[in-house]
Image: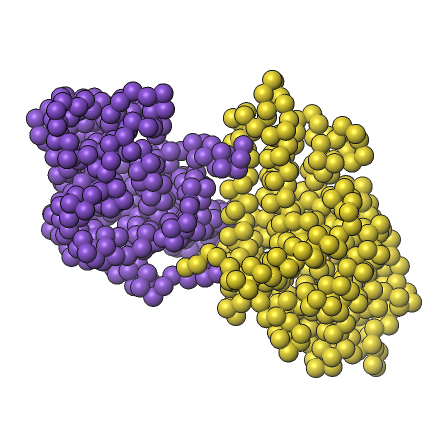
Chain colours: A yellow, B purple
Amino acid sequence: MNFDFTEEEKQFRQEVEDFAKTELPADWDEKALYWPAGYGTLPGLEKEFKEFHDELLLKLGRKGWLTIGWPEEYGGMNSMIKHAIFDDVMSYHRAPGGDVSNAIAGPTILLVGSDDLKKEWLPRIGRGELRFWLGYSEPNAGSDLASIKTRAVDNGDEFILNGQKIWSSGAHIADYAWVLAKTDPDAPRYAGETLMIVDNKSPGITIRPIENICGICSFNEVFFDDVRVPKKNIVGEVNKGFYCVMMALLYERLFVGIGAFRRVLDELVEFAKETEHNGQPLAKDPLTRDKLAAMAIEIEILYGFYWKTAWLMDKGQVPVLEASVLKLFGTELGRKLAGAAMEILGMYGQLKRGSKWAPLRGLVSLGYMDSVSGPIGAGTSEVQRGIIATRGLGLPRK
Amino acid sequence: MDFDLSEEQKLLKQSAHDFLSKECPRELVRRIEAGDEEFPPALWKKMAGLGWMGLVIPEEYGGSGGSFLDLVMLFEEIGYKICPGPLFSSVVFGSLPILMAGSREQKKEFLPGIARGEITVTMALTEPSASYDPSSIHVKATARGDEYTLSGTKLFVPYATGADYLLCVAKTGEKKRPEKCISIFIVKNKIPGITITSLTTLAGDRQCEVVFDDVTVANTGILGTRDKGWPIVEAILENASLVSCAEMIGGAQAVMDMSLQYARERTQFNRPIGSFQVIQNYFADMWTDINAARYLLHKAAWKISEGIDAGMDVAMAKSRTGEAYRRVTTLGHQIFGGIGFTKEHDMHLFHERSITGDLNLGQGAFHRERVARRLGL
Ligand SMILES: Cc1cc2nc3c(=O)[nH]c(=O)nc-3n(C[C@H](O)[C@H](O)[C@H](O)COP(=O)(O)OP(=O)(O)OC[C@H]3O[C@@H](n4cnc5c(N)ncnc54)[C@H](O)[C@@H]3O)c2cc1C
């Protein structure tokens, strides 16, 4: 056993740290209020940050940091641990690191894509030139993704797409959609869906933003009305879309914004030290101490699951169990941390961004709202527990 | 990063598992717990033959020079098989303090005997206040010429009845900072003035009250240096907490494995109860709880093995593990239904140990306070 990083990994962490310090705007800490493991406050999804984010992605691309986990032949560093270090540092600064394009689209294309597909998309993704949004969920297909209704009909060298997606995070700022559509409505469950890349500028696409409970338009409903999708944009094989989706889920699950947990803890510890309450520093209050210590312990555990998942991936394993536990534990911890933070801030916790009285720049009031989203998005907690028990521990489904 | 065990550690675990499956069946555990039988000397000898008592004792003192992490691996198996007996106390409360603080003579005198299983040692630390704070040490050692006399009461002393020696933690002065005047004495057990009474405890684990009434000890019996005992106690408490975590995690794993098997076999409403989502959720939470604690344990033990300060990690591990073990056994009970509430079933053995494991060596809140201090609060 060894819980230390190699010298090279430590150096890499420092390099990312330096990058974050020089490349993030001076007022970034004021602006970015991302809550760990939330899906509603990701700065990369906010319109206000689009220009900055586009530029940042290009810079990250030049550094080769959008493809850290990819094999070397595709410009990667072949290290999920390094990728995890990168995300740890960037999320500590609440900075956008990667997004759907390099976390989901890239790895999926690597795993199931044809050579042509790889040639066309991987270099552009690696350079940070384009952004994807994830078109899985529909009004009547959330946890039960197999019941999607969006239909792609074969029409020679293209598919014609009709239907509706919802909760499409970032569709309003992205360039392409990563869409799962029905190609064979008569096939058995999980055998009639196909994954495809759809240009956001295609005629027939309508994107309507939806405001989330944090007051941010992070997601959308998207309508496809006779949208033409060239066949070369099919990812993997026709009617094998479900399989492709499953392959990439593991990668997505590393994205719990792990550094932001650490950051919140640091900020709360500072707050407790600086704040007088009942004539003494809050840091002396036994209940506050207990809450902060409990959070520190849970966060350390989350790191355990995080490094272990990355380490297993580097060993070439498919850590279904660990990755689901990471997602479940991380998003649930996001809620616990928000609750603990509110209790520590007391009445001040309710003050929003912009109020001169708001501690931590209003982060906690926003985070408390966003912490709802983690255990729902990207496979609910109930779905994760089911995966852990059946696929992980082998319990019977019936 | 490397989450894997070494080949030696895997072998150690596997051989301990096989050995205990054969030599320490639940029947024996029950008889010992009920007080019908003491820990069998023949089994103790075999364990010594496997090198368990000398696992972390250096070769020059008759041990095999293993690491603390190795010890933790062994105790996960001990805990899995809920193997009772003085192994924990003799290794953790006997050999480790002598190793840490003893003079060369003391090491030579005691360690080879401990490693061979011929001498057992335990530590008389806690007192009726049941606290791990230096201010709670009231047993007094009074100097008289080149001797000391010890007086006072120790409580929750593990395996004192069978031990050959007691490491008695006593006050050797009165100072404003009590941790500056605490010494550890190596006392031959059962000499005049020592009275030992067994406590009846939930897990029948041979904890004792030990009363010292003007017990005479030569000043050569001080372990290490006079007045410098508390840092050793602190270090031993950290080690003991982790070994206890290892036992608890082993136990929790056993509960989960037993429950998993049952959930696959037991049918109600014409289907295995393990196919019910609520039961599946229990398992997801058990797995998470166990492996969360296991990570904290392994990381802390690795740090100790590497000589890195592990204060924060130990506190995290102990606070999380005791509570996790309790949650896991409670869920296990729920899964077994009525049958698990019978004395005949094994679940209660784990339920008892989960709560005593949490209570001893500092509960969750105690260790969270230690974490808080280290966070700079
Ligand atoms: C902030 C946010 C961002 C998102 N971004 C995207 C995105 O970019 N792209 C995208 O495609 N989707 C996105 N989603 C959608 C997300 O994946 C779905 O919300 C999620 O899969 C749940 O689906 P649902 O909302 O339809 O709820 P349902 O599936 O209707 O679930 C409702 C409740 O029923 C429970 N439930 C359902 N089935 C079972 C079962 N078999 N057993 C037990 N309980 C069950 C669920 O766990 C949940 O508690 C996002 C969601 C959020 C909140």
Residue depicted at x 59% and y 53%: A327
Q: Could you say where residue A214 lies in the image, as x and y percent from the top left?
A: 77, 41
Residue depicted at x 29% and y 20%: B174
Outermost residue on the front side: it is: B145
Outermost residue on the left side: it is: B192
Q: Could you say where residue A147 lies in the image, as x and y percent from the top left?
A: 71, 60
Q: Is residue B97 above or below residue A132?
A: above
Q: Quadrant of residue B132?
A: top left
Nearest to the observer: residue B91 or residue A210 = B91
Residue depicted at x 54% and y 49%: A302
Q: Is residue B90 visible?
A: no
Q: Quadrant of residue B149?
A: top left
Q: Quadrant of the N terminus of chain A?
A: bottom left
Q: Could you say where residue A161 lies in the image, as x and y percent from the top left?
A: 83, 68
Q: How many marks?
A: 0
Q: Could you say where residue B243 lies in the image, as x and y percent from the top left?
A: 33, 45
Q: Is residue A227 visible?
A: yes
Outermost residue on the right side: it is: A203
Q: Is residue B322 left or right of residue A89?
A: left
Q: Is residue B336 left or right of residue B46?
A: right
Q: Is residue B89 above or below residue A122?
A: above
